[in-house]
């Protein structure tokens, strides 16, 4: 089964860009969709967006102006960039695979905590 | 955006109890609904998709039902490992949205 692992800085300064990478193992990224989700401390889950391996994307309108999701098929990775971050972007960030037939988020990474602070 | 409302927000139950959690969508979502289980400090785990289909490897004590706007997740006999927070999520339309979660605690 596919496994996912998030990586990236755990601390980002306000107004800077948060950058995370999700590495896919046990399967090829050149299939289906790949998603990012976040969870602020003590709060619920928020879908950020997804990318198809071909590069087409769909973003949550609440974040669309600041989000870029990209894919690197040669490295079996996809990435998240969130610009102009504030303390409100402090959260655990998860990557997930989207099942190609049933179209739901079936496998999740363990998550990585990102704190926005100076 | 489609709003997903879960009830109750929390519940206390005993080992062996049958537990039902409800999720209501603000508009019809057909059967494009998933349920996730999340334990403290862990990532969400997929339980149910398409409202009633069991994710591979998930025990059959979990079941889902519903279509349109009203959905339920049932745990037939609660075990110690089932104490967690449960989330519903719609994937009928963008942006995909989650319920606020239901925390299942030990009575």
Image: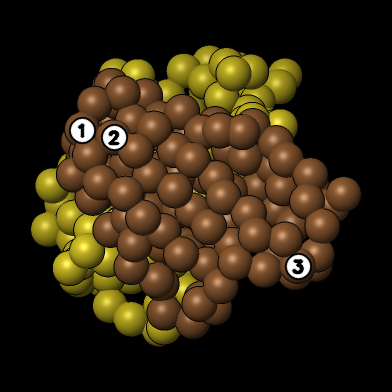
Chain colours: A yellow, B brown
Instruction: Name the image quarter holding the C terminus of chain A.
Output: top right
The residue that mark 2 highlights is B69
User: N-terminal of the two: label 3 or label 1?
Assistant: 3
Count every numbered label the image shows and give the total. Answer: 3
Q: In the figure, A29 relative to A113: above or below? A: below
Mark 1 vs 2, N-terminal side: 1
| Towards the viewer: A72 or A102 | A102
* Residue depicted at 20% across the width and 33% down the height: B28
Tell me which chain the residue with mark 3 is part of: B
Judged left or right of residue B79, residue B62 is: left
Residue appearing at x 60%, y 66% in the figure = B76
Q: Is residue A71 left or right of residue B58?
A: left
Tell me the residue at 53%/57% (across/down): B74
Do the residues at discs 3 and 1 belong to one chain?
A: yes
Q: Nearer the viewer, residue B9 or A68?
A: B9
* Residue A78 % position (x, y): 34, 56
What residue is at 28 percent from the left and 35 percent from the top? Answer: B69
Q: Quadrant of residue A61?
A: top left
The residue tagged 3 is B16
Determine crowd level at label 3: few under 14, some 14-19, many 20+ residues with C-alpha closer than 10 A: few
The residue under label 1 is B28
* Mark 2: few/some/many CA within 10 Å (<14, 14-19, 20+): some
Assign a secondary structure to mark 3: loop
Disc 1 and disc 2 in contact, CB within 8 angstroms: yes
- Are circles 3 and 1 on residues that touch, CB within 8 Å? no
């Amino acid at each position: 089964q596919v496994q996912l692992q998030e990586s990236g800085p755990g601390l980002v300064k306000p107004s800077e860009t948060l950058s995370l990478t999700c590495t896919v193992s046990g399967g090829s990224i050149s299939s289906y969709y790949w998603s990012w989700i976040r969870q602020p401390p003590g709060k619920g889950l928020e879908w950020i967006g997804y990318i198809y391996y071909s590069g087409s994307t769909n973003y949550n309108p609440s974040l669309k102006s600041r989000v870029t999701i990209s894919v690197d098929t040669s490295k079996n990775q996809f990435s998240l960039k969130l610009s102009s971050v504030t303390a409100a972007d402090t959260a655990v960030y998860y990557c997930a695979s989207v099942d190609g037939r049933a179209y739901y988020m079936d496998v999740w990474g363990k998550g990585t905590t990102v704190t926005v602070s100076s | 955006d489609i709003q997903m409302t879960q009830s109750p927000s929390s519940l206390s139950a005993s080992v062996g109890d049958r537990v039902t959690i409800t999720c209501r969508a603000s508009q019809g979502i057909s059967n494009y609904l998933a349920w996730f289980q999340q334990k403290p400090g862990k990532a969400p785990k997929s339980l149910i998709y398409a409202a009633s289909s069991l994710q591979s490897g998930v025990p059959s004590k979990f079941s889902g039902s519903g279509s349109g706007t009203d959905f339920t997740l049932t745990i037939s006999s609660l075990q110690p490992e089932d104490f967690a927070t449960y989330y519903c999520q719609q994937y009928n339309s963008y942006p995909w949205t989650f319920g606020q979660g239901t925390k299942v605690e030990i009575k």
